[in-house]
Amino acid sequence: MRIVNRFRSQSPSVDTTSSSRSSPALVRKLAASTRDDARQRLRLNRFLLASAFSIVYLLVLALFSLQRKVDTATLVEASTIVAILIVAFFGIFRLGLNLRFVDPSLTAFQVLAAVFTMLFVVYRAPETRLVYATFLFVALMFGMLRSSAMQLTVLGLVSLASFAIVSLVRYSDTGDAEMLRIDLLQLCVTALALPWFLFLGTRVKRLKEADRRKDEFLATLAHELRNPLAPIRMGIHILRRTRADSHAQSVLPMMERQVQHLTRLLDDLLDVSRITRGKITLRVERLDLRHVAQAAIEASRPAITDERHELSVSLPREPLWVDGDPVRLAQVLSNVLNNAAKYTPEGGRIALKAERHGDDIEVCVSDNGYGIPRERLQSIFDMFTQLDSPVAKAGGGLGIGLSLAKGLVALHRGTIDAHSGGPGRGSEFRVRLPAGPSRADDTPMVANEPAIEGKAKVLVVDDNRDVTASLAMFLQLMGHEVRIAHDGEKAIQLAEEFRPQTIFLDLGMPGVNGYEACRRIRDASWGKNMRVIAITGWGQDEDRRKSAIAGFDMHLVKPVNPETLGQLLRDPGRAA
């Protein structure tokens, strides 16, 4: 904890209590400072891990000393060198002096320091040459994930050359030809192994980079596909409110189902990306799992009804209390129910049963569908896994529903297992969660804030003209007075002239983006009490943090449910 506080004290001081009045440069300085602190702590943690390997090396030398293969003076001198190096590097990281180097992690310097220390011991105690070779590769592995292939190659060549020099110097001092022969043999073996080691290191770095790009791709894909969904969803509600002809009335439910299906796919993609990077956040509360099960059933009912399945539900009379995120748990059960509907022939049977077993709550979803081959029971939860089933529906998903369910259940400290007698014998999924203590019946209810009655003045800002037009039309049909803008500069101007009560503001706009527009509105005396709500395709935790720093009251992700927007205009206390 002291180390973390030390890093924070070195960061540029920023007054976060007045973030709504902060200049753009000040907010950028705060974000950069936070990132630098996190990176510096990571560098120090990696150095401490490397130091642990140095201590292990000294312990190995101590064992050699007990066997009289290393004299006491050499052990003491090596321990002194290691201690001095650890203290020196620790001080450099604590004082932030490493930031003055091109590579702030100082990987090359740490590896070279370890190599030269071990070579000193090899010169004094030749029997430790194999230990040197082992720890050399450990040292290179330590730098493998943080250095380029060129750096690793240079470090490897320097290490080999240094070992050769030490061997020749010792031969000139002792004239021991047998020892020189052994040294040269080890040098040749190490030289042959080094290219393969560097090749593996390069491959590992490429795989890590590919994994990072994949996560970025998923997040970007979800963002880009949300934008066209927003006007489509708004158009559906506009048509419903204007009472279109009978043909349109029959088409509207179909359109909305497709929009909801595509939205669910995007949400799953984004959630997988968050879980993979450990960025997902649970909103844990004490809840009755029976209510969560009912919500999941309603979410999955279209998929079950379309295939004419028979659904039986068995829930106990007494509450099933757990501590969890109701939205995420409903998502888990809904994914399992959708999977059952997908892999069960038309007119099949699906059953959901929830009950308490000791200290756990178990929810079991079973079906009489295609079943799961025994060899696939474990891999069924892997990403993008789908069974080759004669009843699997075309376009039935991306194969991420069960993987996402397993990740969410693990975050709740629970388990999910698949069971099946084999092909044609149906399947059963069991979700087990830790049971929570019973909640008191007299839990006080929190009163809602008074609602806004009548017409509201609303400003809609988005560089996508279809988005602004559809949202403005929908709000006007609700009776509100609306103005629109397509860039941040125009939004600031209209906000000053129109003085809206609520501003729906996009973030990613050319020129003056949503963050800067919100900050400038908050800086003005007339904009301090306006409610500014971000409506954007970017929904990562970092995006929400940045919008909060900029002064937004809420952060909504496209496509927003129009009923949610109507509720927000009626109820200013409603959370996003």
Image (tube, grey):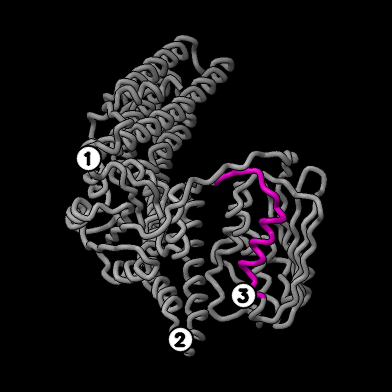
Count of marks placed on residues: 3
Instruction: Residue type at mark 3: give it.
Output: Pro
Image vertical order of residue 370 relative to residue 127, above or below: below
Nearer to us of marks 1 and 3 is: 1
- 3 or 2: mark nearer the eye: 2
Residue 201: x percent and y percent?
Answer: 40, 47
Residue at image point 22% right, 29% down: 100
Calculate the distance from the C-alpha at mark 1 to the C-alpha at mark 2: 47 Å
Q: Residue 302 bears which disc, if any? A: 3
Crowd tier of the residue under label 1, counting other residues whose Cα lies within 10 Å: few below 14, some 14–19, many 20 or above: few
Q: Earlier in the sequence, mark 3 or mark 2?
A: 2
Picture coordinates of residue 417, whole percent (x, y): 71, 57
x and y percent of residue 555 in the render?
Answer: 39, 51
Q: Residue 296 in magenta?
A: yes
Residue 213 seen in the current view: yes
Q: Secondary structure at mark 2?
A: helix
Between 414 and 46, the residue placed more toward the observer is 414
| Residue 345 placement (x, y as % from top left) | 70, 81
Of mark 1 and mark 2, the one earlier in the sequence is 2
Name the residue at the front extreme. 454
Q: CA distance from mark 3 to mark 2?
A: 20 Å
User: Which disc, if any, is residue 525?
Assistant: 1
Q: Residues within 10 Å of mark 3 (few under 14, many from 20)?
A: some
Closer-to-camera residue (166/311): 311
What's the amino acid at mark 2? Ala
- Magenta-drawn stretch contains 525: no
Image depth: mark 1 or mark 2 in front: 1
Q: Earlier in the sequence, mark 1 or mark 3?
A: 3
Label 3 secondary element: helix
Magenta-drawn segment? 283-304
Q: Residue 178: which quarter of the image?
A: top left
Q: Which residue is mark 2?
A: 248
